[in-house]
Image (cartoon, grey):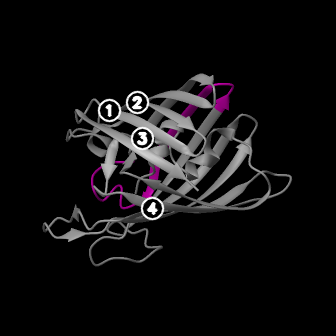
Amino acid sequence: MKKTAKLLTFAVALFAGFGGTAQAEGFKIGADAVTSYVWRGIELGDSPAIQPALSYTFAGSGIIVGAWGSYAVIDNTKDIAGNKYRYKEVDLYATVPVGPFSLTATDYFVPAGDNNKSFDFSGDGPNVVELSVGYAQDNLSLLAAINVAGNDTSLGYKNAKYFEAGYKFYNKDGYSAKGVVGLGNEDYYGAAKGDNIALVNTGISVSKDRYTASYVYNPNTEVSHLVFMASF
């Protein structure tokens, strides 16, 4: 239920809706190929992945509705019983721009095990609903998010929260670079069992044309990732 290596520019893909970034009206399609799927400091799927995206922007209002997915190339994720399966995620979202702010509702759908119903928001279902607000002004971007429904509470995470700040500090010769710092509940985004807010996501992302390389380090899990992404 997590979003793309693009996390360092605020991540997410759907995440394009966050931060108040303008998008031309009408339909937009695309896809990313990533060496691994890293979201908010954690790796999901332990495999290269293909991440398609589809969105529609309404004229005048700038409201965006869309879908984003991630499909692992290799069956390398283990369930509770230790069986390997191929990680899959399909997210639906709606973003409403309000000046430099963006209000977004996201349904993260991650089928696993026997329950694969797309719109099952029960405590043991495969969906989590998140509400977030993003802010973008010049080179600064901010994000605050909270899980409000779905299986989040049944797993004991108690409405997990995440906060992120990003700053683009370089833009020259076709290259741009951005640094990111993210805080979140350590039992959801980190390795600890407590629900304290901890530093879980730090890194730098460098982009040129349709390519992005990101170094991500999660201080809570003490694990780092180097991700390469090509966008189409």
The answer to whether residue 19 is left or right of residue 220 is right
Counting residues from the start of the chain, the first of labels 3 and 2 encountered is 3
Q: Secondary structure at mark 3?
A: strand
Tell me the CA gap for discs 3 and 2: 19 Å
* Residue 217, disc: 1
**Residue projecting furthest to the top:** 169
Tell me which label, 1 or 2, sits earlier in the chain.
2
222 vs 125, left or right, is: left
Per the image, the residue denoted by label 4 is 50
CA separation in Å, label 4 and label 2: 22 Å
Segment colored magenta:
136-159
The kind of residue on which mark 4 rests is: Ile
Q: Earlier in the sequence, mark 1 or mark 4?
A: 4
Check contact, mark 3 vs mark 4: CB within 8 A: no
The amino acid type of the residue labelled 1 equals: Tyr
Disc 3/disc 4 C-alpha distance (Å): 27 Å
Q: Is residue 33 above or below residue 208?
A: below
Relative to 72, say whether 141 is above or below: above
User: Which quadrant holds residue 209?
Assistant: top right
Classify 10 Å Cα crowding around label 2: few (below 14), some (14-19), many (20 and above): many
Q: Specify the amino acid type for callout 3.
A: Lys
Location of mark 2 (residue)? 203
- Between marks 3 and 4 in the image, the one whose residue lies nearer the viewer: 4
First in residue order: circle 3 vs circle 1: 3
- What residue sits 47% from the left and 48% below the top? 229
Residue for badge 3: 161
Instruction: Check disc 1 and report its element: helix, strand or loop.
Output: strand
Which residue is drawn at the image coordinates 46% and 53% (left, top)?
148
Q: Which mark is residue 27?
A: none
Nearest the viewer among 189 and 53 is 53
